Image (cartoon, rainbow, N blue to C red):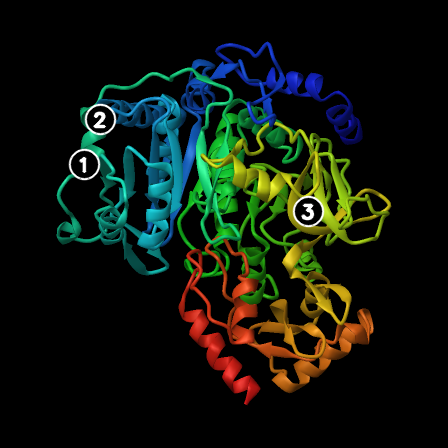
Amino acid sequence: MNADTLFKNSIENKENFWKEQAQEITWFEFPDTILSRDENNYPQWFPDGKLNMCYLCIDKHIEEGFGEQIAIVYDSPVTSQKKIYTFRQAKEEISKFAGGLVSLGLKKGDTAVIYMPMIPQTLFAMLACARIGVIHNVVFGGFAPHELVVRIDDCKPKALITATAGVEIAKRIPYLPLVEKAIELAQDKVDHIIVYNRKLVDNQHEMFDGLIDYEELVQKSEPADCVSVESTHPLYLLYTSGTTGKPKGITRDTGGYATALKFSMKYIYGIEPGDTYWAASDFGWAVGHSYSVYGPLLNRNTTVIFEGKPIMTPDAGTFWRIISEYKVSAMFTAPTAIRAIKKEDPDGELVKKYDLSHFKKQFLAGERCDVATLDWFEEHIGVPAIDHWWQTESGWPMLGLMTFDDQYKIKRASAGKPIPGYDIKIFDENGYELDPHQEGYLVIKLPLPPGAMLGIWNDYDRFQNSYLSQYNGYYFSGDGAIKDEDGYIFITGRVDDVINVAGHRLSTSEMEEIVSSHPDVAECAVVGINDDLKGQVPFATVVLKNGSSISEEDLERDIIRMVREKIGAVAFLKNAMVVKRLPKTRSGKILRKLIRTLLDGKDFQVPSTIDDEKIIDEIQEKIQYYKA
């Protein structure tokens, strides 16, 4: 069956299609009802099915004779540690930690917050919760206490699972002082605080009363069996930013999610059981949940947990070392990571040091990948770099390419075609579908396929208002897009990243494409800033490639000319400011809204997801110098 037939079946025969896919995973009770609706009339998949996610990820493979296969590779250049775990070894720790949670009184339906770095124990904690039906919420380790408090107050966890510290390049980030502060500020008391002591330094002075030692809890506890849960039982909550400032607790089901992930590993990523798959994402992101933990382990793939940075530990060849050392078949990362490597190693010299013969595909998501980066990757790595698009809300790809049969065709700068199950349309403001090559709003006809969000935790009204109220019967993605005559979709950015220059709607991503094609540009961000005459005008911030000798004045002149040639005078891009680096989240997304706010000279809050706050001072200083 080819990709087009799969997609057609998924839209025209939804229930039969997803029933067949549900048969690819093991259920304790296979669902009689494939699709129904909840009390709010929102679609639900497999509501009367019963299963357990931890069983699918771990126990099932052991029962089938794969207990000695490597399940997890941990590679931490920042602590000079490497470790592997077989499925059997993983089960021993997960089941005993789950037993420890049970001994503390946690049970199916309770919640737990996991505030930990990129270490195996984070994955063990997630699966231990899934094993006993406890709903987990992973929060970035090192998040400010306020961010932790917001999540604690919203989901009211019975336990908070943390570690003593994370490591950022060479700097130890203590977590316990942050946890202690959050516990003081939270409205609700957390019954149990469990801490994994990494023993990186003598940290006794950071301990406080009431802490439960992770390793001691594991050692003294009896293993817990997998608990059968309903398909619609929440597996986890994952908070994402909202327009009101209060994060939205995206709620993910179990059965639909397991079905969708299994489908995606086979058809989208083209990965066979037994292969090694690496998603270079923090556990705190949706990618970390879906493709560092649940997706690969469901599919009996070895997953890689990497603690470090792509260009700093020790050099820009780190990604290629890991791919070579662990025979990675496919990798998933943000375009920013590849751009950072390209900047440090523009001629690909470090790539040549490693055997990448096992490496078949590179997947990119998180933000649109510019053509210059795709070209660099193709030239120096020699495997397909496949851009695709999805959201925390979807939990798995919405746009991409079906790579299972190697018949796919990449269109550079496109995020691919709609994935089976996603009936995607491009609407204008009035809800009319647009013809090819016209920019509009990307919407998806309900029902969303299995694996997509159940809703927002304890807030249906906000779910309705945020996603379902703009166009009746459709999910509103909040992104602008253009579809071409072949059905490929090009994401133009968040709706608020489409700027209005004197009545013309212009895509900042299109301008970024042009700016990034300049031979001296490593990466860039184009944002719309306030203008008294035109409402908004585009402004480019640019990072130069290492070794570039072009003057800032010549670069700005080149960029203005290039944009004028490609888009026209209507684009009105007059400014290109060179900066040392762009502000980003920990997963590598460029913080465009922050750049826009700084350029407009408005008050701002430091985003909780920012990778390094010092960048703000650097940019503000450069703005003063630039405007002087």
Residue 108 visible in the snapshot = yes
Looking at marks 3 and 2 on the same chain, the residue that comes earlier in the sequence is marked by: 2
Q: Residue at x 64, y 29 (%)?
A: 449
Is residue 349 something one can see in this rendering?
no
Label 1 sits on residue: 212
Residue at (45% x, 50% y) in the render:
246
Query: What amino acid is labelled 1 in the image?
Result: Ile
From the viewer's perspective, tell me whether residue 617 is left or right of residue 445.
left
Circles 2 and 1: CB distance less than 8 Å? yes
Marker disc for residue 129? none
CA–CA distance between discs 3 and 2? 48 Å
User: What is the secondary structure assignment of the residue under circle 3?
Assistant: loop
Disc with the residue nearer the chain's start (2 vs 1): 2
Residue 384's mark?
3
Residue at 53 percent across and 13 percent down: it is 48
Asked if residue 329 lies left or right of residue 138, the reply is right
Q: Quadrant of the N terminus?
A: top right
Question: What x and y, as percent, mark residue 165?
Answer: 28, 50
- Of residue 378 and residue 550, the one placed in the foreground of this image is 550
Q: Is residue 540 above or below residue 297?
A: below
Q: Amino acid at mark 3?
A: Pro
- On the image, the x and y values in percent for residue 18 come to 66, 21
Q: Give the labeled residue for mark 2.
A: 104
Q: Quadrant of residue 390?
A: top right
- Quadrant of the rendered structure where residue 170 is? bottom left
Which part of the image, by quadrant, shows the C terminus? Answer: bottom right
Q: Identify the residue at horizontal 70%, vertical 16% (top origin).
A: 16
Q: Is residue 380 above or below residue 131?
A: below
Judging from the image, what secondary structure is the residue with disc 1 in?
Answer: strand
State left or right for residue 102 relative to residue 305.
Answer: left
